[in-house]
């Protein structure tokens, strides 16, 4: 069976996510193609942020463990889900993981998921490694910089794909999202949702 990231657990307030035009079910699920989000109570997780991921197609022994610090649950493969989001969001493009040791974290993810490191990019003192996790194809971008203190890896932020980034930004409002600009990926554009929205985690929007 091929590994899949079924959803990311994000500690935050459902109302904030609904305010940008995302469907949030009563159980906190934000249904997206490939990998969904699940909004959970920040008081139960030590504060806001991406606090874990739920994988299918992996060993049951991973359930309730950590993959180099990344809190992990293992489940059976889920049926595809999707919601008609006013934001025009279709899925998650990638999730960012911060670590002091790219090779250590990348190796742990490869062992857990069977998905090897695809490439490494160096920008000054920053290094980025990229995994694509099986079915669903979520990109895990691992980032390391000299100033990151020793310790385990941690989730940092995420990027949502939207069909029309100009319409999405207009819906959110110019005081709550940055103007779209060219992304690093050729031919794509990106905009960053401002902290004032209260999502509790860095979130960007990107064209498909």
Image: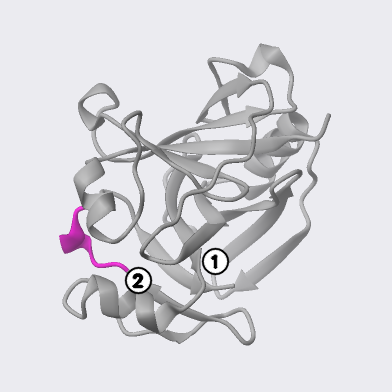
Q: Quadrant of the C terminus?
A: bottom right
Q: Residue at x 19, y 60 (%)?
A: 197
Tell me, yes or no, if residue 44 can be seen here.
Answer: yes
Rendering coords of residue 61 (x, y %):
68, 12
Task: Say which residue label 1 marks.
Answer: 126
Query: Disc 2 to disc 1, how far (Cα)?
Result: 20 Å
Q: Say if the magenta span includes residue 195.
A: yes
Element type where label 1 sits in the image: strand
From which residue to which does the magenta span run? Answer: 193-199
Which dot marks residue 137? none
Q: Is residue 60 above or below residue 34?
A: above
Q: Is residue 73 left or right of residue 121?
A: left
Is 128 rendered above or below residue 122? above
As drawn, the residue found furthest toward the right would be: 1
Q: Quadrant of the N terminus?
A: top right
Give the class, few, some or many, for how many residues have Cα within 10 Å of label 1's Cα (few <14, many ≥20): few
In the structure shown, which secondary structural element does the residue marked by tag 2 occupy? strand
> In the rendered view, does 94 fall on the left or right side of 120?
left
The crowd level at tag 2 (other Cα within 10 Å; few <14, some 14-19, many 20+) is: some
Closer to the camera in the image, 76 or 147: 76
Tell me the residue that label 2 is attached to: 192
Q: Position of residue 162 (x, y in %)?
A: 49, 69
- Decide whether residue 47 is among the magenta residues: no
Q: Residue furthest top?
A: 61
What's the residue at 59%, 50% (across, down)? 33
Question: Colour scheme used in the picture?
Answer: one colour
- Lower sequence index among marks 2 and 1: 1
């Amino acid at each position: 069976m091929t590994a899949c990231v079924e959803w990311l657990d994000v500690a935050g307030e459902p109302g904030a996510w609904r305010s940008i035009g995302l469907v949030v079910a009563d159980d906190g699920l934000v249904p997206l193609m490939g990998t969904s989000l699940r909004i959970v109570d920040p008081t139960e997780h030590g504060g806001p942020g991406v606090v874990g991921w739920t994988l299918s197609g992996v060993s049951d022994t991973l359930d309730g463990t950590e993959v180099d610090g990344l809190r992990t649950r293992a489940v059976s493969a889920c049926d595809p889900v999707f919601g008609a989001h006013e934001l025009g969001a279709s899925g998650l493009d990638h999730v960012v993981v911060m670590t002091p040791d790219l090779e250590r974290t990348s190796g742990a993810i490869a062992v857990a998921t069977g998905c090897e490191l695809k490439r490494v990019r160096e920008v000054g003192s920053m290094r980025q490694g990229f995994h694509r996790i099986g079915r669903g194809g979520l990109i895990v971008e691992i980032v390391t910089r000299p100033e990151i203190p020793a310790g385990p890896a941690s989730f940092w932020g995420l990027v949502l794909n939207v069909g029309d980034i100009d319409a999405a930004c207009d819906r959110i409002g110019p005081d709550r999202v940055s103007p779209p600009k060219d992304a690093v990926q050729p031919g794509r554009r990106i905009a960053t949702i401002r902290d004032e929205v209260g999502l509790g985690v860095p979130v960007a929007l990107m064209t498909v």
